Image: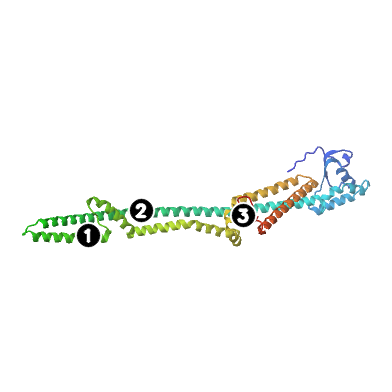
C-alpha cells in the first residue's frame, strides 16, 4: 500500500500560481475545465486526478461534464488541451487501461500458479502415502524372509541333530557287529575238533548279523563308518546330507525360497504401483510415453516452483501499482520485450538441436578429438 503525505489542501483557485512536487485533484461538481487544468498543472513531478465513480463509464461521464463547464469562460479548448494527458488513463487505449489489463493478467497468473501448487501438494501427499505403504510392505517382506530363514535354520539344525544321533547309534551297532564277527572268526580258527562246530555256528550268526547291518546302513546312509574313531565325524556328515532331503527341512527351505522371491519382486511391483498412481494423476498416455520422467519428478519441488511463480506475479503487480501509469506501461513493455526475446532464443536453440539430431553427417567426436568420417 502506498502512503501519501499531504502538505496542504486548498481550492483550485486558491492554488493558482503555486508549484508543488505532487498535486492531487479531486473531481467534483464544483470544478470546471479551468479548475481541472489548474489542479493538473501544479505538480512539478507528479499530478493525479481522483474521480469517485461506480465504474469507468461513470468516471468518464463525470470528467466530460466537468470539461464542458467553463464558469470563468477562460477557454474550453485550452483547458481540454492542457488536461489531455490526464484523461489518457480513462480511455480504452490509455496507460491506465493497459496497466489494468496487465494487473488482471498477473492476478489470474498468480491464482492459477497457486492452484497448480496446491495440485502438486495433493500429488505429493498421495505419493508420500504410497511410499509409506511401500515401506511397510518392504519391512514386512524383509521380516518374513528373515523369519523364514530363521525357521529353516532351526528345522535344519534340529533335523540334523536327530539324524546324527540315530546315525551314530546305528553306526556303533554296526561296528560292534563287525567286531563280534572278527572275534568269532578268531575263535573258529583256533577251535579244536569238538568245539569247531559250535564256533562255526557262532561265526555264521555274527557274520549274518554284520552283513544285515552293513546292508541296512549302506542303504540308509550311503556309506559305512570305518572304525570307532571315525564314527562321530561319519555320523555328522551323513546326518547333514540326510537333513537336506528331510521333508520338514525341504518344506522350510521352500518357504525361504518363496519369501526371497517375493522380496526380490517387490521393488518392481512397487514401481508399477507408483506408475499406476501417476497415470491416474497425470494421464495414462503421458506416463506411458515417458514413465521415468514422472518417476523422477519431485512434487515438492514442483509445488515450490509454482508458488515462486505466484509470488513473482504478485510482486510484479505490486510494483506496477506503485508506479504512475506511464512508467508502469514502460516497465510492462520492457518485460514483454525481454520475455519475447527469451522465447525466440529458446526456439532457435530447440531448432538447432533438432537440426543436429536429423543431420546424419554430424557425429559425436571420437576420443582422439577427431570427428568420425574425416
Q: Which quarter shows the C terminus?
A: bottom right
Tell me the SS state at disc 1.
helix
Mark 2 vs mark 3: in front: 2
145 relative to 339 in the view: left or right? left
Q: Which residue in the protein does label 2 denote?
A: 153
Q: Which residue in the protein does label 3 denote?
A: 119
Answer with the quarter of the image where residue 13 lies. top right
Q: CA distance from mark 1 to mark 2?
A: 32 Å
Mark 1 vs mark 2: in front: 1
Mark 3, other Cα within 10 Å: few <14 / some 14–19 / many ≥20: some
- Given contact means CB atoms under 8 Å apart, are the residues at marks 2 and 3 in contact? no
Q: In this view of the protein, which residue sits in the foreground, 272 or 6?
A: 272
Task: Identify the residue shown where x is 34% and y is 53%.
Answer: 154
Q: In this view of the protein, which residue sits in the foreground, 18 or 258?
A: 258
Q: In this view of the protein, which residue sits in the foreground, 292 or 355?
A: 355
Q: Which quarter shows the N terminus?
A: top right
Task: Identify the residue shown where x is 76% and y is 49%.
Answer: 332
Position in image of residue 116 (x %, y %): 64, 54
214 relative to 94 in the view: left or right? left
Mark 3 vs mark 1: which is more N-terminal?
3
Tell me the SS state at disc 2.
helix
Q: CA distance from mark 3 to mark 1?
A: 80 Å
Q: Which residue in the protein does label 1 denote?
A: 214
Mark 2 vs mark 3: which is more N-terminal?
3
Mark 1, other Cα within 10 Å: few <14 / some 14–19 / many ≥20: many
Position in image of residue 205 (x %, y %): 15, 61
Position in image of residue 182 (x %, y %): 16, 56
Tell me the SS state at disc 3.
helix
Task: Identify the residue shown where x is 41% and y is 58%.
Answer: 257
Task: Identify the residue shown where x is 54% and y is 52%.
Answer: 128
Mark 1 vs mark 2: which is more N-terminal?
2
Amino acid at each position: 500500500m502506498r502512503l501519501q503525505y499531504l502538505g496542504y489542501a486548498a481550492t483550485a483557485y486558491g492554488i493558482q500560481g503555486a508549484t508543488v512536487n505532487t498535486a492531487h485533484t479531486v473531481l467534483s461538481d464544483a470544478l470546471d475545465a479551468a479548475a481541472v487544468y489548474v489542479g493538473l498543472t501544479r505538480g512539478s513531478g507528479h499530478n493525479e486526478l481522483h474521480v469517485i465513480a461506480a465504474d469507468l463509464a461513470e468516471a468518464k461521464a463525470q470528467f466530460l461534464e466537468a470539461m464542458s463547464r467553463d464558469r470563468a469562460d477562460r477557454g474550453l479548448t485550452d483547458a481540454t488541451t492542457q488536461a489531455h494527458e490526464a484523461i489518457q488513463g480513462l480511455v480504452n487505449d490509455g496507460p491506465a487501461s493497459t496497466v489494468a489489463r496487465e494487473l488482471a493478467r498477473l492476478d489470474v497468473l498468480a491464482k492459477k500458479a497457486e492452484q497448480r501448487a496446491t495440485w502438486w501438494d495433493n500429488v505429493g501427499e498421495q505419493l508420500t502415502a504410497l511410499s509409506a505403504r511401500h515401506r511397510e510392505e518392504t519391512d514386512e517382506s524383509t521380516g518374513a524372509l528373515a523369519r523364514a530363514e530363521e525357521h529353516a535354520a532351526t528345522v535344519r539344525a534340529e533335523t540334523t541333530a536327530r539324524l546324527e544321533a540315530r546315525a551314530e547309534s546305528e553306526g556303533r551297532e554296526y561296528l560292534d557287529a563287525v567286531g563280534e564277527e572278527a572275534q568269532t572268526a578268531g575263535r573258529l580258527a583256533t577251535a579244536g575238533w569238538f568245539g569247531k562246530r559250535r564256533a562255526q555256528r557262532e561265526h555264521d550268526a555274527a557274520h549274518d548279523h554284520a552283513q544285515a547291518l552293513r546292508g541296512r546302513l549302506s542303504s540308509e546312509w550311503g556309506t559305512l563308518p570305518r572304525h570307532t574313531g571315525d564314527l562321530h565325524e561319519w555320523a555328522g556328515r551323513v546326518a547333514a546330507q540326510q537333513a537336506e532331503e528331510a521333508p520338514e527341512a525341504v518344506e522350510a527351505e521352500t518357504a525361504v525360497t518363496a519369501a526371497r522371491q517375493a522380496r526380490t519382486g517387490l521393488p518392481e511391483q512397487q514401481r508399477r504401483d507408483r506408475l499406476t498412481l501417476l497415470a491416474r494423476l497425470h494421464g495414462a498416455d503421458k506416463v506411458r510415453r515417458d514413465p521415468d520422467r514422472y518417476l523422477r519428478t519431485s512434487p515438492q519441488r514442483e509445488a515450490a516452483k509454482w508458488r515462486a511463480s505466484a509470488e513473482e506475479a504478485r510482486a510484479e503487480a505490486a510494483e506496477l501499482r506503485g508506479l504512475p501509469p506511464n512508467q508502469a506501461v514502460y516497465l510492462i513493455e520492457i518485460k514483454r520485450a525481454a520475455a519475447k526475446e527469451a522465447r525466440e532464443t529458446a526456439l532457435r536453440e530447440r531448432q538447432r538441436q533438432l537440426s543436429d539430431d536429423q543431420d546424419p553427417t554430424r557425429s559425436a567426436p571420437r576420443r582422439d578429438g577427431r570427428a568420425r568420417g574425416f
